[in-house]
């Protein structure tokens, strides 16, 4: 029991340490595909170290929400790390929550981030949080339906059941593609948001964290990286189903994540960012594909 | 196993065509769909050691993935029409209609083939092919530009080909070749027709073709 707890903690730390690397790889790939040199894949780590050592500036008009938010957001995603079996299918705290808990713990973080962006009373923050909530209100139904379909496919909503999907099925592939579209929206990637720009017309996530600096910003960025790796983990279960075993589990896991990163990088450079109200079409499409996969799951495919 | 990938790709590209708002997007998605179809034909050919199907798969690739999309995009460039497809139903409603079309074809197919037996994959392929026929018809009816009528018909043709492939492992070789020839000539004739329509009426909006002009 103690040994298992220890292994679960190691796995969570492994996820947290790996998370910035995946962002770095995607960034590097995007730059290389654009025939640029790009920063090193370890740049997110350097950023983290740089920011964590810095002092921060907090507006006098903010309340406790502004100061508590980075901790709450990081705490929520870190808590999800304990709910997912990554290296072995029994490495997670089962009684704590199932796949639905994962989605709603993310919502908690998002709720506080949206509040904190309003708290500083900057116009950008308000704009960012209103956009974020607009997008989330369409992304969440699609995510929920796809998670339900995954549950239908393996008979249980427990993460270990979802992680040990056997082979591809028609419904799991369709809901996986819906989940992939949502994952691009949730991780602030191009058809919905752009991580690389601070142009006021387009930014969503960046607008919300604009008021933050120093240590808080480092925590928020780390939280974004971890959220991304968690979405990619769920995608990797759906698209590359193979038994997870502890010995080489980590190597397979990294390979799967790298393949997904390549897909994400290619999608990102080959698409243009959508107008905000086109996002409705995009996420509506994801929702419909999720419903479609639910129909197939009920047929038993 | 691979069948599932090709079929779900085919189905996804169908729904992408329903939401497409621009001619280029529609035509490119059609090319993607034909790519999935030709890969599926290749897979069946390798699986059943069927040499004729191999040739047909190659023909689909050359004709429907490369030549026909280029021809359609060439007409678009030549008559210099704007990108907008002219949606009579907006994308959300179109998607819901497409979902119902899919459901109807499922109801229809479930009366013919059982989804729970060992032939479940065939049943799904048959459902997808019927959906393709319905959605092709949908694209022909609810989009205004004449070019989407062309793509709609090609999608219907893809659907019938998929049905033949799923049920019997392809139609007889001669029939298949004849259909390909037909489709190719059809696209060439349509190209000239659309060009003439544009010359005569200065647009290719089919809703306005009912008014007489003398």
Image (cartoon, coloured by chain):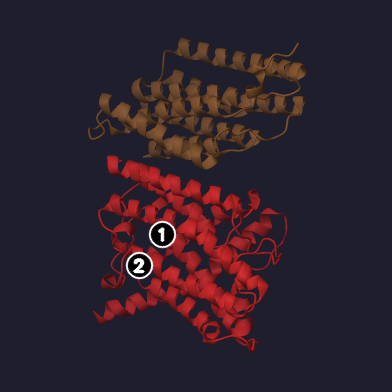
What colour is chain B? Answer: brown
Secondary structure at numbered mark 1: helix
| Residue pointed to by mark 2 | A101
For residue A234, the mark is 1
Could you tell me which residue is drawn at 26 percent across and 57 percent down? A156
- Identify the chain of the residue marked 1, using the numbered disc in the image: A
For the C terminus of chain A, give its image quadrant.
top left
Q: Which numbered mark, 1 or 2, is in the foreground of this view?
A: 2
For the N terminus of chain A, give its image quadrant.
bottom left
Q: Nearer the viewer, residue B52 or B120?
A: B120
> Do discs 1 and 2 share a chain?
yes
In this picture, is A70 found above or below B17? below
Q: Nearer the viewer, residue A83 or A141?
A: A141
User: Which badge, 1 or 2, comes first in the chain's sequence?
Assistant: 2
The location of residue B31, given as percent across then percent down, is 57, 32
For residue B118, the mark is none
What colour is chain A? Answer: red
Could you tell me which residue is drawn at 56 percent across and 12 percent down? B182
Q: Nearer the viewer, residue B196 or A248?
A: B196
In this picture, is A232 found above or below A289? below
Q: Is residue B72 left or right of residue A229?
A: right
């Amino acid at each position: 029991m103690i040994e298992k707890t220890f292994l679960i903690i190691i796995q969570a730390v492994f996820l947290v340490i790996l998370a910035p690397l995946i962002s770095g790889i995607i960034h590097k790939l995007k730059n290389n595909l654009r025939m640029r040199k790009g920063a090193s894949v370890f740049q997110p780590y350097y950023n983290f170290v740089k920011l964590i050592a810095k002092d921060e500036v907090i507006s006098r008009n903010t309340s406790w929400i502004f100061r508590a938010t980075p901790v709450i957001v990081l705490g929520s995603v870190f808590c999800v790390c304990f709910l997912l079996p990554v290296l072995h299918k029994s490495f997670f705290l089962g009684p704590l929550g199932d796949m639905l808990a994962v989605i709603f713990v993310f919502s908690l973080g998002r709720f506080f981030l949206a509040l904190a962006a309003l708290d500083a009373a900057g116009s950008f923050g308000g704009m960012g949080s209103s956009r974020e909530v607009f997008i989330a209100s369409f992304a969440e139904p699609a995510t929920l339906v796809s998670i339900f379909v995954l549950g239908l496919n393996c008979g249980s909503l427990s993460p270990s059941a979802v992680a040990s999907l056997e082979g591809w099925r028609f419904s799991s592939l369709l809901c996986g593609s819906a989940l992939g579209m949502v994952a691009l929206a949730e991780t602030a990637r191009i058809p919905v948001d752009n991580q690389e720009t601070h142009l006021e017309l387009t930014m969503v996530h960046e607008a919300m964290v604009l008021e933050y600096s120093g240590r808080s910003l480092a925590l928020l960025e780390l939280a974004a990286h971890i959220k991304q790796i968690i979405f990619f983990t769920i995608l990797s279960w759906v698209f590359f189903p193979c038994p997870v075993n502890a010995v080489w589990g980590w190597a397979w896991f990294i390979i799967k994540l790298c393949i997904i990163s390549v897909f994400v990088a290619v999608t990102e450079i080959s698409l243009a960012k959508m107008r905000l109200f086109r996002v409705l079409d995009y996420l509506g499409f994801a929702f419909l594909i999720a419903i479609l996969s639910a129909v197939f799951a009920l047929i038993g495919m | 196993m691979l069948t599932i990938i090709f079929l779900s790709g085919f189905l996804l590209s169908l729904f992408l065509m329903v939401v497409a708002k621009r001619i280029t997007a529609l035509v490119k998605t059609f090319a993607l769909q034909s790519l999935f179809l030709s890969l599926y034909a290749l897979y069946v050919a390798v699986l059943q050691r069927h040499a004729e199907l191999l040739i047909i798969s190659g023909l689909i690739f050359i004709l429907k993935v490369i030549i026909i999309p280029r021809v359609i995009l060439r007409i678009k460039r030549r008559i210099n029409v704007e990108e907008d497809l002219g949606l009579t139903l907006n994308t959300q409603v179109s998607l819901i209609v497409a979902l119902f079309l899919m459901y109807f074809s499922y109801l229809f197919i479930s009366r013919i083939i059982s989804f729970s037996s060992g032939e479940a994959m065939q049943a799904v392929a048959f459902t997808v092919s019927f959906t393709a026929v319905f959605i092709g018809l949908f694209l022909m009816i609810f989009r205004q530009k004449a070019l989407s009528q062309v793509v709609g018909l090609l999608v219907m043709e893809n659907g019938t080909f998929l049905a033949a492939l799923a049920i019997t492992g392809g139609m007889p070789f001669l029939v298949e070749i004849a259909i390909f020839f037909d489709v190719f000539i059809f696209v060439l004739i349509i190209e000239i027709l659309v060009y003439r329509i544009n010359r005569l009426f200065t647009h290719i909006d089919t809703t306005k073709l009912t008014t007489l002009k003398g």
